Amino acid sequence: MDIKSVIEAGKTAIGIELGSTRIKTVLVAEDSTPIASGSHTWENQYVDGIWTYSLDAIWDGLQKSYADMAKDVKEKYGITLTKVGAIGFSAMMHGYMAFDKDAKLLVPFRTWRNTITEKAAVRLTEAFHFNVPQRWSIAHLYQAILNKEEHVGEIAYFTTLAGYIHWQLTGEKVLGIGDASGMFPIDSATRQYDAEMVSKFDELTAEYGFDWKLQDILPKILVAGENAGCLTEEGVKKLDISGNLQAGIMVCPPEGDAGTGMTATNSVAVRTGNVSAGTSIFAMIVLEKALEKVHEEIDLVTTPSGEAVAMVHCNNCTSDINAWANIFREYSEAMGVEVDMNRLYTTMFEQALKGDVDCGGLMGYNYFSGEPVTGFEEGRPVFMRTPDARFSFANFMRLHLYSAVATLKYGLDILFEEEKVAVDKMFGHGGFFKTKEVGQRIMAAVMNAPVTVMETAGEGGAWGIAVLALYTMTKQNGESLESYLNERVFGNQKGSTLTASDEEIQGFNEFMKKYIGALAVERAAVECI
């Protein structure tokens, strides 16, 4: 493949995903091969009791990530990127971005990380007979109503972060069905918002006398493969400050990080699943039948094409590991030793496999923020040990990798043991799996099943949304997303599959018993610190 000619001909697609700590941009060829990439690091801010990102940070990060990718194209191939065949935008799901009729943001962006909507989530779950988690957009809206916040009466539109970016760059108020399923419950038969629940919400809010009905302010739903508009002249200026990119590029439906994770791991078919592990961690399994009960620990969302998915979502995963990595870096620098952070993380992860399978008596909780799956509105990172614990670096690291996935295990046991959900293939992606074998082996112990990591797993959601853009651009008549991924994207891809040993599975299970038994310590930390 002559990559330079492919780029010049515009036979490419761009995927951009705004994750919790990094905004990544990927340029792929028509066969989905990544050929250039760029990124920008950012962090959420805790302002007035709200986890948020400012609009300035959103646009600055988006522009810098795109510019970094364009720079990579220039350096690798000696050409300026001016056109592509399609583009797609993805971002962390859920949260709350509400706008008035003049497109003004009414209150600061409330991200998925906030656990401030408990009353609303409980009431909606009871009214809908369907689990509505705290981080869902509808829970944020209803909580604002219950709080009698003045801005609610002014709402003309509310959406997710991906929906906001897409709207600003195309003028289209639409959302991919996967991302929409984290705003409001979906009816997988109609591929639309559940009509009965929409009516129920309007009944619940009728007494407030708003000028709007729910359907009026929600984004229009599109499924994978549908054309979601084109980059406008104004939109291009907001994305590419160099002015080199041409307007008119086809855009696919904006999706959430759950949908791009499913795409990036080829887990959109029934009885397949994937685990995305980074700042947050979530596992998704495409269901072959409806769940028997409503479980507050289990979300029901959809694939980008609308199939029902059970998801266990946990707010906390690698943040505590990152914090300890910075401590080790500071210590090394204080000792006069320069540290390569990639090598540091690799060492930390590899040492974990040398630890005892039950962590040698060490215990900890990685709760930077609240964790609804285990019933916490707030979090406090905690590390503790018994006096006779085997306190080694290897056990310390194994503990922190176990802690990163323990809450996920807590939720998954409901699916596997109570609902008897079956899964044939499980795929892993995200930073937790970056170090070869380590995170994969631990996750296999969590799942008590083989876990596969594909060669492209490191590309993550940005690559996933680029693939969805390609699907919109190149799909043939009647070609399903499942077929497209199986035959045209993953047909020749290689991956590694690992199964945990009986000893590793037993060791993790022993750890989980102690983890659940010591949750009272985490609760005391929240109350006392």
Image: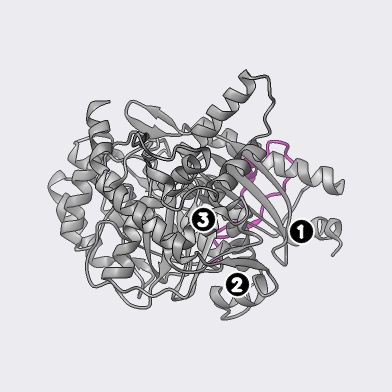
Calculate the distance from the C-alpha at mark 2 to the C-alpha at mark 3: 18 Å
Residue 349 magenta? no
Q: Which residues are magenta?
A: 226-255
Q: Amino acid at mark 2?
A: Leu
Image spot of residue 34 (x, y percent): 71, 57
Q: Which residue is mark 3?
A: 254
The residue at 48%/46% (across/down) is 398
The residue at 45%/37% (across/down) is 391
Q: Amino acid at mark 1?
A: Gly
Q: Which residue is mark 1?
A: 10
Which image quadrant for residue 471?
Answer: bottom right
Calculate the distance from the C-alpha at mark 1 to the C-alpha at mark 2: 22 Å
Q: Nearer the viewer, mark 2 or mark 3?
A: 2
SS class, disc 2: helix
Calculate the distance from the C-alpha at mark 3 to the C-alpha at mark 1: 21 Å
Residue 69: numbered disc = none
Residue 485: numbered disc = 2
Look at the numbered discs 2 and 3 and tell me whether their residues touch, using CB distance below 8 Å: no
N-term mark: 3 or 1: 1
Is 508 left or right of 236, judged from the image as shown? left
N-term mark: 1 or 2: 1
Is 318 left or right of 437, judged from the image as shown? left
N-term mark: 2 or 3: 3
Image spot of residue 325 (x, y percent): 55, 34
Which image quadrant for residue 334?
Answer: top right
